[in-house]
Image (tube, rainbow, N blue to C red):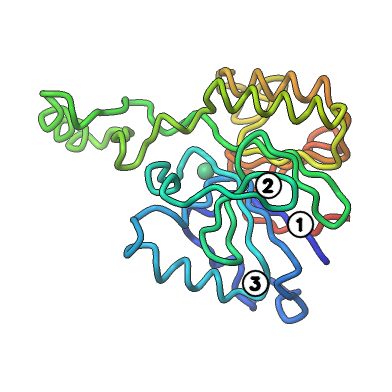
């Protein structure tokens, strides 16, 4: 069994085409590729997503993902939660699985702590709520001036950041594992690293602070994360991934 890991897809899965993924021919459904959030395959609703998700099911490997900030959380929530290899998942297709937050999975004798979610960075000009009375006026005003904004339940969801229950479950599971796992897979990175990405302009938040706590308390071999759209290695153990596909040792 081989395990690969890659960064944000945003609904574009062209990196998994046989001509771009040299191992393609040798892979089976026992092999897995893990996406570090911003999967984007569940986005347009059941009918809108059908073709894209059916194509992912036809890939020669099993596709796993933690959630990022750009996921349709209303739609994801329509898939039931079930148990898989020691943690909670949603089956999107028989071989396309959403790995929930705060879980520890056992794959091929190795443990993976997963904690998706992130605060959106591309909302500089605001987040609009269609329920607000002045929504239409504000929307067209922002649209006209090419503003960077998002709309609740259309392309932005408050569930992008974990709930208190999800943090609680994460802490309980890490405690049970003695704060020792082989791999950590998240979408955003710990607060202590934010000054080293995007010129240090990213503010910490509750999730990056929680991940910093995890980084300081947990013994791990490698930590994989996405969100910042770069391929970089920090301190030999923290791997920020974007389009690159890495095979785990
Ligand atoms: Fe992203």
x and y percent of residue 82 in the render? 59, 50
Sequence-first disc among 2 and 3:
3
Question: Does residue 183 sit above or below 204 in this rendering?
Answer: below
Residue to which mark 1 is pinned: 246
x and y percent of residue 14 in the render? 54, 67
Numbered disc 2: secondary structure: loop
Residue to which mark 3 is pinned: 20
Q: Residues within 10 Å of mark 1 (few under 14, many from 20)?
A: some
Sequence-first disc among 1 and 3:
3
Sequence-first disc among 1 and 2:
2
x and y percent of residue 234 in the render? 79, 34
Numbered disc 3: secondary structure: loop
Residue 219 quadrant? top right
Question: Does residue 16 sit above or below 34 in this rendering?
Answer: below
Residue in the picture at 75% in, 67% down:
31
Residue to which mark 2 is pinned: 241
C-alpha distance separating marks 1 and 2: 9 Å
């Amino acid at each position: 069994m081989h395990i690969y890991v890659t960064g944000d897809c945003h609904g574009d899965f062209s990196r998994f085409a046989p001509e771009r993924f040299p191992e393609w021919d040798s892979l089976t459904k026992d092999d897995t590729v893990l996406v570090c959030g911003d999967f984007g395959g569940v986005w347009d609703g059941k009918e809108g997503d059908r073709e894209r998700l059916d194509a992912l099911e036809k890939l020669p490997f099993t596709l796993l993902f933690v959630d990022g900030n750009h996921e349709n959380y209303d739609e994801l929530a329509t898939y039931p939660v079930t148990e898989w290899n020691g943690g909670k998942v949603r089956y999107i297709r028989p071989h396309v699985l959403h790995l929930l937050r705060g879980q520890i999975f056992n794959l091929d004798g190795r443990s993976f702590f997963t904690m998706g979610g992130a605060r959106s960075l591309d909302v500089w000009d605001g987040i609009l709520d269609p329920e607000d009375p002045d929504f239409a006026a504000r929307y067209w005003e922002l649209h006209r001036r090419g503003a960077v904004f998002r709309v609740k339940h259309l392309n932005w969801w408050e569930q992008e950041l974990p709930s208190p229950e999800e943090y609680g479950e994460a802490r309980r599971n890490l405690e049970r594992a003695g704060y020792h796992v082989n791999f950590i897979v998240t979408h955003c990175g710990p607060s202590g690293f934010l000054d080293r990405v995007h010129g240090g302009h990213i503010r910490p938040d509750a999730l990056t602070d929680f991940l910093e706590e995890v980084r300081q308390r947990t013994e791990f071999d490698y930590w994989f994360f996405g969100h910042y759209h770069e391929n970089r290695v920090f301190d030999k153990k923290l791997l920020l991934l974007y389009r690159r596909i890495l095979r785990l040792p």
